[in-house]
Image (tube, rainbow, N blue to C red):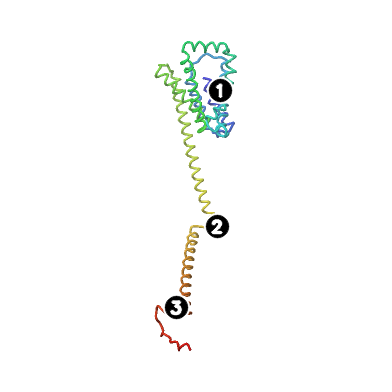
Amino acid sequence: MCKSSVLGFVLLFAFIFKLEKPSWRLVLIILTMTVGVLMMAAGETEFSALGFVLVMTAAACSGFRWSLTHILLIRHPATANPFSSIFALAPVMFASLMLLSLPVEGPLELLRGIGTFMSIRGPVFGPLILLFPGFLAFCMTASEFALLQRTSVLTLSIAGIFKEVVTLSTASVVFDETLTLVNLAGVVITIIAIVAYNWMKYAKIQEEARAKSLAAGVGSLDRDDEFDASGGGAGDRQRLLSGIGGSHGSDSAGLAGLGRSGSSSSTSGNGNGSAGIGMGKGPAKRPEDYE
């Protein structure tokens, strides 16, 4: 039951690190979901003070860890993808687990247990059985980091809550686990809270997309207004193109007129011009006429 407090710590650290925008509606949805998870796990009567402190500390550390992992994925270029993040975090996680497990389990007992397992399963299947859960854990961690990179730390935690709902429902259907009315009510409340959260995220995404499209439209209108204010509107562009075309036409006409005038002047200046010969105008002069 205490494990359900992880969602509250995740939300708290998301607000502290500004990964989520504070909202009373979001807080209400998370509180409702937490109550539903508590009702799903209701039925445990034994209470241990040490266990309660350890579980609550683990829940707080889990929320803090996921928030820092989200920051690494979205803000640091060296850990901008899930596999680079695993490469950076895996040695620290391995060292932490070894430092905590060796004093509790004992190095000799750990080696003795591995030797017994290898003798039972054999030298081939023994290592494969040990490595296969590690491979599954690696794939699960990579998928969690990929989801965390594309969504948010709160969405990842709610996906974990949905996993618990599926696990509890499967245990009831397949393994005939008995669920009380309180447990069933907790399942229904949790599912309703998950649906409400997804609807809120969908509405937020639609609003952001609408705001971006509106900003893009306003920006294009502002650029058109600036172009019009500088004397470069659509009408000015058309008149400019017409003026260029007209100047080209006038230049061509001027060149044509110049060519005609040049031809006429050369023809008039030279009596033996091609135009005079071709047209055959005027009487042919005799040599004595030049004297």
User: Who's the residue at 39% across and 18% down the image?
Assistant: 174
Mark 1: few, some, or many residues within 10 Å (few <14, many ≥20)? many
Residue designated by label 1: 59
Mark 2: few, some, or many residues within 10 Å (few <14, many ≥20)? few
Marks 3, 1: nearer the viewer:
3
Residue designated by label 3: 273
**Disc 3 to disc 2, C-alpha distance:** 56 Å
User: Which callout, 1 or 2, points at the residue further toward the start of the chain?
Assistant: 1
Residue 188 placement, left or right of 21? left
Mark 3: few, some, or many residues within 10 Å (few <14, many ≥20)? some
User: Which callout, 3 or 1, points at the residue further toward the start of the chain?
Assistant: 1
Marks 1, 2: nearer the viewer:
2
Residue 230's tag is 2
Is residue 113 depicted above or below 60 in this figure? above
Between 105 and 60, the residue placed more toward the observer is 105
Q: Amino acid at mark 1?
A: Ala
Between 44 and 18, the residue placed more toward the observer is 18
Location of residue 215 in the rendering, given as x and y in whole percent from the top left corner: 51, 45
Q: Amino acid at mark 3?
A: Gly
Location of residue 184 in the rendering, given as x and y in whole percent from the top left corner: 43, 21
Q: Are marks 3 and 1 in contact (CB under 8 Å)?
A: no
User: Which callout, 3 or 2, points at the residue further toward the start of the chain?
Assistant: 2
Marks 3, 2: nearer the viewer:
3
Q: Amino acid at mark 2?
A: Ser
